[in-house]
Image (tube, grey):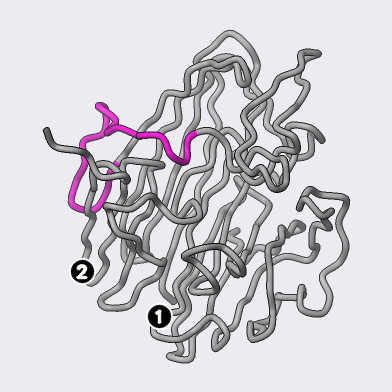
Amino acid sequence: MNTPAPSGRQFELVLGAQRAVIAEVGASVREYAVGARDVVLPFASDRIAPAFSGAVLVPWPNRLGDGRYTYAGVEHQVAITEPERSTALHGLVAHERFTPAPHAPATATSVTLEHYLVPTAGYPFSLRTRVTYALSDAGLAVTVTTTNLGDLTAPYGIGFHPWLSPGDATVDECTLRLDADKRVKVDDRLLPTGTEPVAGSYDLREPRLLAGVALDDAFVDVRRDADGLSWIRLGAPDGRAAAVWMDGSMDALQVCTGDGIPVIERRGVAAEPMSCIADAFRTGERLVHLAPGEEHTVRWGLALL
């Protein structure tokens, strides 16, 4: 009997000096490098992905307070997965298998994986999420479409969890730049309480040295470049920057320096594009109401600049 690896089957993409490995579990970006330079922190295929590394976060990113929410007048309870804060963290599929989509055969530079989320007592909605990873000269692009297959309108959000690599440097030697004007304020459970203009160590609109800076924060009021993209850039002393971009389909970003997180411990910086911030199922802020038969598509990507 062959025991499958915790990360499942592996799908390797190659284009020139670029190489990406997408893992079946979580449709995770397990590796992405340009030549010998990692863009994301890799993890071994025979390990459980540490700290949601590279995973797709559906049907909500970030935290859901007490795992409890009311939607269309009905109260629901999902499992508490972060007991120390009494929250449900990062949705329902980050540790589930995604399988190759039959309509889109894999190529040397692209793969499409899909997951069918079946209704449960805590989330009684039927969703299909299809994730396409594609290499081009610009980097690794990700397109995700979720379709409501059921007969009930579903509350929905999506996010992603790559850990940017500092290369041969340490995080403290790197700078971080993030295109956003407001930071989300939180309580002691990291649930949102409002927003404020970025200031001090939270003002990352220009590159800021990360030495002595600890972050686990969401940002909104994003800025966009001439192509309509918002960016997070982890600049290293070698002059290169591991970067995440998102297009206009999402408008929130989360960054985390990994302080106190086992295995990570400031080895990289989480750069998370999101369609909504924490607790959206309870607050309704930026929540997508996905009607029966409706699709929701987002796009983001990774690059070494």
Q: Is residue 39 left or right of residue 177?
A: left
Front in this rendered view, residue 154 or 61: 61
Asked if the stretch drawn in magenta spans residue 96, the answer is yes
Residue behind mark 2: 16
User: 228 or 41: nearer the eye?
Assistant: 41
Q: Which residues are magenta?
A: 93-111
Residue that badge 1 annotates: 167
Residue 57 place in picture, x, y as percent: 53, 42
Residue drawn at the location 30% of the way across and 72% of the way down: 34
What percent of the width, then of the height, locates residue 56? 48, 44
- The residue that appears at 27% across and 53% down in the rendered structure is 45
Above or below for 280 versus 202? above
Q: Nearer the viewer, mark 1 or mark 2?
A: 1
Is 61 inside the magenta-drawn segment?
no
Dot 1 falls on a residue whose secondary structure is loop
Magenta part mainly helix, strand or loop?
Answer: loop
